[in-house]
Amino acid sequence: MLQEAAQYLKDKVSFMPETGVILGSGLGGLTKEIQILHKIPYAQIPGFPISTVEGHSGELVFGNLEGKKIVAMNGRFHYYEGYSMEKVIFPLRVLRLLGVEKMIVTNAAGGLNPDFEAGDIMLIEDIISLLPDNPLRGANEEHLGPRFPDMSSPFDQAWMERVKHVLDQLGFDLKKGVYVGVQGPKLETKAEIRYLRIIGGDAVGMSTVPEIIAAQHMGMKVLAFSVITNECIPKVAKEFTHEEVVAVANMAGENLVRLVKGVI
Ligand code: HPA
């Protein structure tokens, strides 16, 4: 199925990008910066998951950004939506078969670290998986990667160093920390928030971890950022709405768009 999807895209797209970007909430604005050459709805690609969310079907956007050929995943699939882990990482594996070697992964997350504020951007330095499943469970796809992939350093150190240079030019403060991936779709109780902080989390969200595991399995270079959309600390923990998360993500996303452009 992966090969069928990859072949479909190879027949449609005039070039093969080296870098991919997963656009999380708030980073959709990046598509406005891309000189678009091809837009392919997920629904047309053989084997791609079918979206459950109305109007959020998603598409692959192929084009030039800052003179580089890239592909952007505009829309991703979450485990909480009911997809198997295999389906969640299917698009990423297809990109790898197309020759994509580097991925920038973004998301919206709650800030567990008391020094974080809504609107901050966090460079993800490491991850903790609290998801109930792992995308690599089952027979290993030997042509994609090893049975027991090393996860001691899932993010590319040299690329993370480059981020510092880009930041010098952009002049905003970048937070750094550990992203904890949870199943969702429920938000955290106060006791869970305390627990996530104790185990070492700086931010919590419902995506990204499966993609990081799959990318590392396939030997891709990865860089990942969270937009902190809400403070997730027991003292201020209150009900907030998905609409608020999206609004903050869209606002802070502008900085993340500048950062991603700079990195590319
Ligand atoms: N918890 C889990 N996922 C999230 C949050 C949160 O507080 N904010 C944005 N995504």
Image: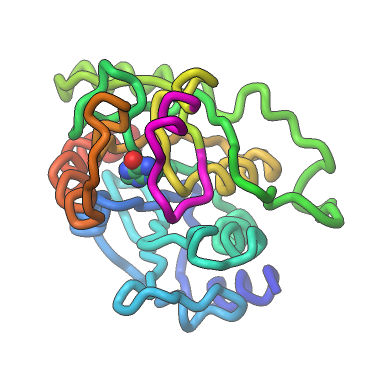
Q: Quadrant of ligand 1?
A: top left
Where is residue 130? Give x, y as percent. Answer: 59, 39
Residue 219 highlighted magenta (yes or no):
no
Quarter containing the C terminus: top left
Q: Is residue 186 magenta?
A: yes
Q: Residue at x 17, y 39 (%)?
A: 252
Residue span colored magenta: 181-195
- Quadrant of the rendering where the N terminus is positioned: bottom right
From the viewer's perspective, is 44 left or right of 1?
Answer: left
Return the x and y of residue 122 as percentages of the image width and height. Answer: 33, 28
Residue 221, position in %: x, y?
56, 35
In the rendered image, the vertical position of residue 154 relative to residue 105, given as above or below: above
Please determine whether, in this image, residue 26 is positioned above or below residue 225.
below
Q: Quadrant of residue 87?
A: bottom right
Instruction: Count the numbered circles shown.
Output: 0
Q: Is residue 224 left or right of residue 85?
A: left
